[in-house]
Amino acid sequence: MRKGEIVTLIGANGAGKSTILKTISGLLQPREGKVFLEGEEISALAPHQIVARGISQVPEGRRVFPELSVLENLVLGAYQRKGKEHLNELERVFELFPRLKERKNQPAGTLSGGEQQMLAIGRGLMARPRLLLLDEPSMGLAPLLVKEIFAIIREINAAGTTILLVEQNAHMALSIAQSGYVLETGEIVLSGSAAELVRNEEVRKAYLGL
Amino acid sequence: MSQFLQQIVNGLSLGSIYALIALGYTMVYGIIRLINFAHGDIYMVGAFVGYFAFRAGLPLPLVFFLAMVVPALFGLTIEFFAYRPLRKRNAPRIAALITAIGMSLFLENLGILLFSPDPRPFPRVFTNEPIHFAGGVTISIPQILTLAFTSVLMISLTLFIRFTKTGKAMRAVSQDAEAAQLMGVNIDRIISITFVIGSALAGAAGVMVGILIPRIEPLMGIMPGLKAFVAAVIGGIGVIPGAMLGGMLMGMAETLVTAFISSTWRDAIAFGLLIVILLIKPSGIFGSSSRTKV
């Protein structure tokens, strides 16, 4: 992956997309192979050490803390940052997602699916990551909301965060990514720029339904 | 009427002991879903530390300090050497449960080995002269101390859980441990802190019981440990206010039954209460019904 890009990982259910993200985040140990971040091997590190190196993950299914308030969820996203330096980030997240500001004292479990996804992304941004891992951000959302979320992902990227986007919605993913990988049963079968992948015959048939 | 009020006061001071022990059960369960059966014996450790500290002539605050710090170290050590290795190997929960029972037996027998199984009188620290209140209610100084210190501990714990960063992380871990790790929470550290806090509270309860009922022995943790566990389940296991309420209910029920029915019914009522609650609301008074994740 190159710095500053949006890279997408597409593939069918069970292809191993989430497994890759969990391995990068340190929740799973790689059985073989290694994970590198800017030349440093991070395969054996614990999840909190990986967050400290600037990688945040927005997990599949949002996984917000349902009984904590929206604000508490966001503050936890900045868990490793000292003192008050997360307050700037909080302002930025509230600018990106004004709806979260309106509901900041509400338990996260009472938010709608789309709002929970916004909260999950906002929470991931609170650590001010260099690399943001997004796992299926469109899952279970209405098409209009998916568009909104993807516009925001692009905005986050434009502000300088590198993004690795895992998606089943290949169409949306390739529309905002610069490059991508196609995963089948744990192996990368295709890779290239997003434009090449969109033109690729197999990708069109298998993932874009064209 | 005054007899009833008197029993309420007695029930509250006994309930304080149960509540403090129940907090440790419920917090550990909330974080790692383990019933730490060695927890009742941690309370015994607190009582013995208090015993020796008083005998050494230390002042009261220092006695309480030591009787909280030493059990906290015990809890920390047990977690580190007994439970953590199992967790790292993804052992099934039953293995951890059996280990907890093993740790309990270990502490009990270590106590017998070091201190002999005979009960010993706890040093008398306060005069037995009760203080009379309006309505014929009398409260002894140990009871006042117990109620006051328990309140301080519970309020501090509530504030800690609610407002500190570590407290928020503890709540996050109990709701979704994996997601909490993705936020950068060091889960091992949170688990250690949970054991430290729970064990310190049990240690404080150990000294209080020594002062209230001046008699301690190595097996003193078994029954109160079991009842505190029941109290935690009644209140909703994993829920902190639930453990506080459950402990108080338990103490109150026992005292009232002893006073107005018969002391032979005391233990039956404790476990009868459990059966009734489990029939009406299986998740406990404050427990939310099973939160299955999609």
Image (cartoon, coloured by chain):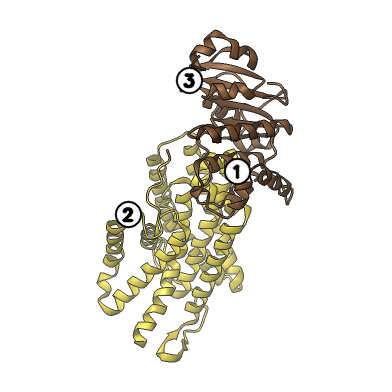
Q: In percent of the image, x 45 and y 75: which residue is there?
A: B212
Find the distance from the CA under tag 2 to the CA under tag 1. 31 Å
Find the distance from the CA under tag 3 to the CA under tag 1. 31 Å
Q: Amino acid at mark 2?
A: Pro
Q: Badge 3: how crowded within 10 Å, few (<14), some, or many (20+)? A: some
- Mark 2 and mark 1 lie on one chain; the one further toward the N terminus is 1
Which percent across, then down, holds residue B53?
A: 56, 68
* Along the line of sight, the residue nearer the viewer: B59 or B271: B271
Q: Amino acid at mark 1?
A: Val
Q: Amino acid at mark 3?
A: Ala
Picture disc at residue B282: 2
Tell whether A185 sits left or right of B11.
right
Which percent across, then down, holds residue B197?
A: 54, 57
**Is A44 rendered above or below residue A194?**
below
Residue B187 appearing in the image: yes
Which percent across, then down, holds residue A106?
A: 54, 54
Q: Badge 1: how crowded within 10 Å, few (<14), some, or many (20+)? A: many
Q: Chain of mark 3?
A: A
Q: Which chain is yellow?
A: B
The mark closer to the camera, 2 or 1, is 2
Picture disc at residue B185: 1
Colour of chain A, in one word, is brown
Picture disc at residue A12: 3
The mark closer to the camera, 3 or 1, is 3
Q: Chain of mark 1?
A: B
